[in-house]
Image (cartoon, rainbow, N blue to C red):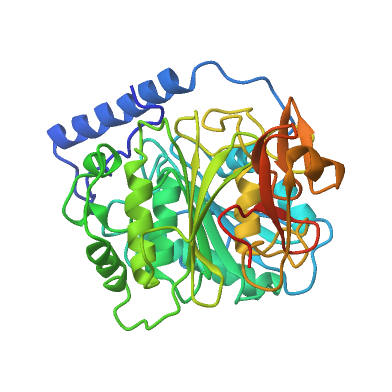
Amino acid sequence: MPQNPPPQPPGPPRTPGVRPRPTRLLASRLLAVLAVVLGAVLTGPAPAARASVALTRVGDFGSDPGALDMYVYRPASLPAHPPVVVALHGCTQSAQVYADNSGLPQLAEQDGFLLVLAQTTSANNPSKCFNWFQDTDNRRDRGEALSIRQMADHAVTAYGADPRRVYVTGLSAGGAMTSVMLATYPDVFSAGAVVAGLPYDCTSDNSPYTCMNPGVDLTPDQWAQRVRDAYPSYRGPWPRTAVWYGDQDTTVVPRDATELRDQWTALHGLSQTPTRTTAIGPDATRQEQYLAADGTVAVEVDRVPGIGHGTPVDPGTGGESCGSTGAPYFPDSICSSRWIARFFGLDTSVPGGSDPGDGGGAACWSGSNYAHVRAGRATTSGGYTYAAGSHQNMGLYNTFVTHTLKESPAGYYTVADGGCP
């Protein structure tokens, strides 16, 4: 059984004064019951009570054609003209659940960005999924897509945020809706992170279930054209895009990560072969990066080992930790939200806040894992060695395993065994 209820088709359209046919009404009610039953089976017993993040609901942010709710988390010390991160929850979830467990409010406090959380309801979809699969909601200036764009616009005007630094991320249906926002509003969002989501417009000729599992195989150019068709007059630049997937996901299969990679590398005119591949985090997540000509990471794919469907979190106390496993679909692994903030260029724990591989001078150091630890370029835990800053797993802590480390920016090290110019 999949870990997340599949997106449910919307109920029958209703015309004022016209009563739905009994068969349609019955089908709608059965669908709602099925969604409740699936949700109860999949979520299991409620987790222990925990303190919730204080969110502010915004009641008037636009015409809201998608009938969504807007919530804001504003850090205690918000800088002038802050960046904005829009977050989209997964099926059966809410803005509150995503805020409480994703780690994003913690990072908003640390990194000084305004966090906007969009929320859909069972009135829109029985499983509380964003309707990423229907034309009334996944096209520019329509339905839910327009509502989310209005939230981003409201954040800029009401909070004095920087319109050049507006980002979007989301899980599952929220991840698929992230693809929608990047495709339909590339003039609004400068970057996005799709967590267990899908390529844009897969459902134009496939059912959502087929798109989710087993997935749909198109050429990179075919995928890219679907994004271009979402806003035909747009001439770029295209948003930078990160993709996060658990390699054991059976709800939205990892094949979709590859198709997403194909879609966005083709839009950026890049090869589907990564510029570099490294292991990051305490679980050795495989990170594939595709660099543009200026050295910036245009597309990134992060494949998390040993987890299924969800937003990976690391609820520990270390500097790279964040999030909570207090609700379903937040597996204990790597703090994906921190790496996403880093990809957006917001992580203040990295000098300059930017991805460590986006150009500039670099120092290189070669030696054994033991030597790197003694020099402060790496740390050791549980018999293994981790590069300082990036926390990449370098293997066993001994004098026999050797690596070349690249230091860029100062104090931030990545494995560069393939060459370090």
401 in relation to 152, above or below: above
Identify the residue at horizontal 16%, vertical 54% (top origin): 205
Residue at (35% x, 50% y) in the render? 258
Quadrant in the picture for the N terminus: top left
Q: Is residue 268 left or right of residue 364?
A: left
The count of marks equals: 0
Image position, residue 403 (x, y; %): 66, 46
**Outermost residue, top direction?**
45
Q: Is residue 349 left or right of residue 216?
A: right
Q: Is residue 200 above or below residue 308?
A: below
Of 348 and 376, the residue lying toward us = 376
Residue 100 in sight here: no
Instruction: Find residue 379 and report its image quarter.
Output: top right
Query: Of residues 235 and 377, which is closer to you in this image?
Result: 377
Residue 239 sits above or below residue 3 on the image = below
Residue 261 visible in this rendered orientation of the protein: yes
Residue pushed farthest front? 400
| Residue 130 x %, y % | 40, 48
Tell me the residue at 22%/47% (across/down).
216
319 or 418, which lies in front? Answer: 418
Q: Is residue 342 left or right of residue 317?
A: left
Image check: 169 left or right of 384? left
The x and y percentages for residue 202 are: 25, 53
Q: Nearer the viewer, residue 3 or 68?
A: 3
Give the quarter of the figure containing the C terminus.
bottom right
Residue 330 at x, y percent in the picture: 56, 33
